[in-house]
Amino acid sequence: MKRAMFAAAISMAAVGGVPVLVAAPSGAQAVPVPQVRPSQSPTATDQIIVRFAGQPDAGAVPDPAGGSAQVRRQLGDGSWVVKLDDRYAPADAAAIAAVYARQPGVKYAEPDTRQFATVVPNDTRYPDQWDLQPVTPNTSYGANLPAAWDITTGSASQVVAVVDTGYLNHADLAGRFVPGYDMVSDAQIGNDGDGRDANALDPGDWITSAENSSGFFAGCGVSNSSWHGTHVAGTIGAASNNATGVAGINWNAKILPVRVLGKCGGYSSDIADGMRWAAGLTVSGVPANPNPAKVINLSLGGSGACSTTYQNAVNAVTAAGSMLVIAAGNSNSDAANFQPGNCAGVVTVAATGRAGNRATYSNYGSTVEIAAPGGNLSGGLDTGILSTLNTGTTSPVADAYVAYQGTSMAAPHVAGVASLVWAAQPSLTAAQVTTFLQISATPFKAGSTCTTAICGPGILNAGAAVAAATSPPSSLSGTVRDGNGAAIKGAQVRVPGNAVAVTDASGSYSLPTVVDGSYTVQADGACRAPASQSVSISGPTVLDFTLGISGGCYVDPAAWDATSTVLALSGDDASLAVALPFPYAHAGASYTTANVSTNGVVNFLAPDTTYSNTAIPNAAAPNAALYGFWDDLIVDGSSSVLADTFGSAPNRRFVIEWRNVALLADTTKRLSFQIVLYESTAQRVRLQYKDIADGTAEAGTSATVGTENAAGNGGTQVLYNNGLLFDGLSVRPK
């Protein structure tokens, strides 16, 4: 970053026939220049236009940004073009120009901004796509795509998944698809005569009056085929600038069709598998996806709290680095009551009409991340969302273009723009892309029925989002230490809406890319009391933390024991009763038998194979328990559970080890951990870990660690779903 002081007086002279900026006499008052940074953004400029009041004097001067400036030429109106030594983003260039403008003898100064031929597609129906066009205040609130297309039209290496009804070979989508998959497992719903297969084509989802009256589809409602997935795909990636039909948001990305819906909808089990497969994760019985999607659109949903199945899928997909964009729903209700849009870690999208109000059908509430054009057909064709479709009422017949409305139409706008942001700045995380979409959103107009309380921060603005993403990134770094100044390894530093940093052995962390803004940054560590600080991040920023002891447990030096006796315990959701070599004192009671489960839990009351973890203490089983890594684990052929006794009475220790066990949700994620039971009540229990990759589910992003009494009303929670474990960690809960 550059910071400089600029002389309060400025003059200009011809040196060798070329005018140059010159400094004021020594002692002139200095004017502070705001922090500015060079930029490689396409909109950055290295020139300022300055108009002087009179004739300049001789001398040389550095430019306000700390480099050297030269006056290159005079314009027809008498002003001069001043060449800086580097390029600066529009806001920084304006700050530099403001310094020039404050100098005596300067009438005005302004950035010599860079202009571009505005990219507007020649698709014949583009004039009908108000949803893609710039905002006209109080009249039309489109997503401002032309300003984004001036910077990027997308990347051919990108893949955007449409998890929906499948796709059709529409002429305006020719060449846009990569091979997808049909995840619909029920042949009746699939309507294609079979279950899951590699054919993601949409055969139609119509319901006849006879089907609606009785049988499997009774009560589903009579309807023509929706061709819903094809409509969504067209919004994201219809062939653009081809003088035909409609324009898509991303002109170059490939679309991955994943069919999960058929006649009368689809099962959440199929949808969850479709989400996983789209992200490149393993799905049993399905070939690997060779084209994982960075952005996954789900224009679907149903009522209810986010299910464990959905949340597990979301956790796995986001851990893989993909973004899930999900429609908020069309029930004019609180989106918190509709899944999977109410799951944690997704981008939930509400719908707005052309006039900038909440679409009358759109769900709303605090779970909504952003609003986007979804249309409102009660206002006519120009307020619907025009996209690719088919004329067939049952099976496909002929290509068509039809306007739909719904949060199903709003979501693909966000998915498409997210893919443009990623094309412009591929190094961003999903959280950072979301932040750019939110901070750049068009504010709701005065009197709008959408507010920041129920529709997110504003309406999607593609041009502003891509421009923000291409500005020079700021960074955050520092150290996390304890009260004695010792480094804390494995601590997490969280900047809302950005990536999470994990400290190394020296206690240092670094986030090389942080979106500019004011944040409350939190640091947390295993057995540490979390701390937070408010900070304004712009440019390289340093922030150090000191964490105290949590009071519930202690971090000790690792003391891994070499177990060798394999227990007869394997598979998924299994338990084994193991006789203890000594009476074990736990939470005021003494036990002689431990029930060891494949899911990382030892409890002393009864066999238990509960795989869905909760925060503790909790009255629900298991209780009287030690939670080494309570998650849905599997002990397969590459893993084992072992137990051995070490030491001699009265200081023996019984060590139970889960070695190289896998997370059932993603068997590529494996770890080892030990629960150590001490005969001496002075020590009691130790939990220790190895073979953990930072920032993955191995660190405990979906696990519970700690201890609990028999009543389920007391104990120590070391962590719950926050990923604070690291390789070599050893903790001693109270």
Image: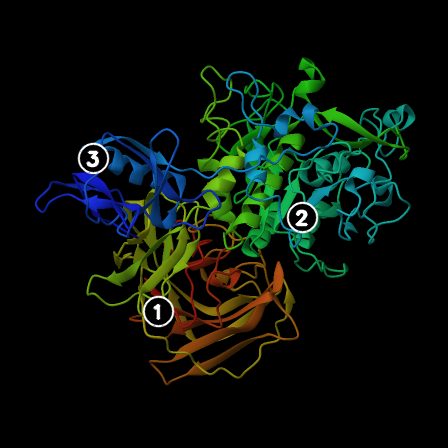
Could you tell me the amino acid type at mark 2? Ala
Image quadrant where residue 734 sits? bottom left
Which mark sits nearer the N-terminus, 3 or 2? 3
Q: Is residue 345 visible?
A: yes
Residue type, numbered disc 1: Arg
Residue, disc 2: 253
Q: Measure the alpha-carbon separation of dots 1 and 2.
A: 57 Å
Q: Give whichever of 205, 586 is nearer the camera.
A: 205
Mark 1 element type: loop
Q: Residue at point 82% right, 54% down?
A: 198
Q: Earlier in the sequence, mark 1 or mark 3?
A: 3
| Residue 709 seen by the camera | no
Three-letter code, disc 3: Gln
| Picture layout, residue 637 above or below residue 280 | below
x and y percent of residue 88 in the render? 38, 46
Circle 2: element type: loop
Which residue is identified by label 3?
A: 103
The residue identified by callout 1 is 684
Between residue 368 and residue 82, name the one nearer to us.
82
Of badges 1 and 2, the one in the foreground is 2
Question: How crowded is the residue under tag 3: few (<14 C-alpha within 10 Å), some, or many (20+)?
Answer: some
x and y, in percent, of residue 717 in the image: 39, 55
x and y, in percent, of residue 189 in the image: 83, 40
Q: How many callouts does the rendering have?
A: 3
